[in-house]
Image: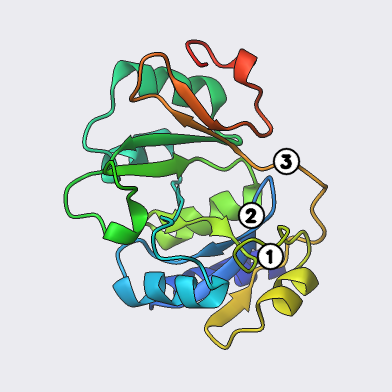
Amino acid sequence: MTEVGDSVEKAAQIIKTGGVVAFPTETSYGLGASIYIEGALKDIYEIKKRPVEKPLLVLIAKIESLKEVAQEVTREILELAERFWPGPLTILVKAKKGLDQRLKNPKGLVAVRLTSHPLAQALIRRCGVPITGTSANLSGAPPARTPDEVLKGLRSQRLSYVLDGGELPKSPPSTILDPTTRPFRVLREGVIRREDIPGAH
């Protein structure tokens, strides 16, 4: 196994056993934990000092994995996923029953993305389950673009490992879209512009 492969494997094992790992995405470093391990999700809130009412983003390994977090995958959601994924579009879907409350907003929606960063993709595949992808910074602080910024910004014993993807280019955050409304509602305009999303306002 290559050095990169070893690093991905180490990060995946930590996540599988309930730890929290920082890793690179196409927009910034994120914090990864298994969406099925309650203690790990709690740790992310502690690490980030994140308000409990703010749910955590979920990252999946492939479009087919939507069914693991979504109550239903509508034609509109599938078309959006096929058009923009992998990439920086975060899509809100109706959460599957039984998902941890920390992943859902008050409307019962979960935010999902299929990241285009190869290290993040490899990590999620090795984990075998969807993981969180919330930004690896204190709540309200600027996003981290290097492993050093992650460590200096968070300073938490609960962060077990940083998967080193080097320095990431400056980037806006992902665009967040709610396709459960008509027309679709852009909650945050980021890398993908509102006018580039069919049916959005």
Picture disc at residue 156:
none
For the residues bearing labels 1 and 3, Cβ distance under 8 angstroms: no
* Residue 6 horizontal side relative to residue 125, left or right: right
Residue 67 position in % (x across, y down): 27, 38
Q: Name the residue at 44% across, 66% down.
A: 33
Disc with the residue nearer the chain's start (1 vs 3): 1
Q: Are marks 2 and 1 in contact (CB under 8 Å)?
A: yes
Place of residue 94 in the rendered image (x, y in percent of width and height, measured from the top left): 27, 37
Which residue is pictured at 50% across the width and 16% down the height? Answer: 200
Residue 188 visible in rendering: yes
Name the one closer to the observer, 5 or 104.
104
Residue drawn 39% across the image and 24% down it: 179
Residue on which the image places disc 2: 119
Badge 2 marks a residue whose secondary structure is helix
Residue 183 drawn above or below residue 7: above
Badge 2 or badge 1: first in the primary sequence:
1
Q: Is residue 67 left or right of residue 118?
A: left
Alpha-carbon span between mark 2 and mark 3 = 19 Å
Type of amino acid at the residue the image marks with label 2: Leu
**Mark 2 or 1, closer to the camera:** 2
In the rendered structure, find residue 172 and report the number of the disc placed on it.
3
Tell which of 177 and 59 is nearer to you. 177
SS class of the residue under badge 1? helix
Which of the 4 image quarters holds residue 72? top left
Q: Residue furthest left?
A: 97
Q: Residues within 10 Å of mark 1 (few under 14, many from 20)?
A: few
Res. 4 mark: 1
Compared to residue 23, the image places residue 16 above or below, namely below
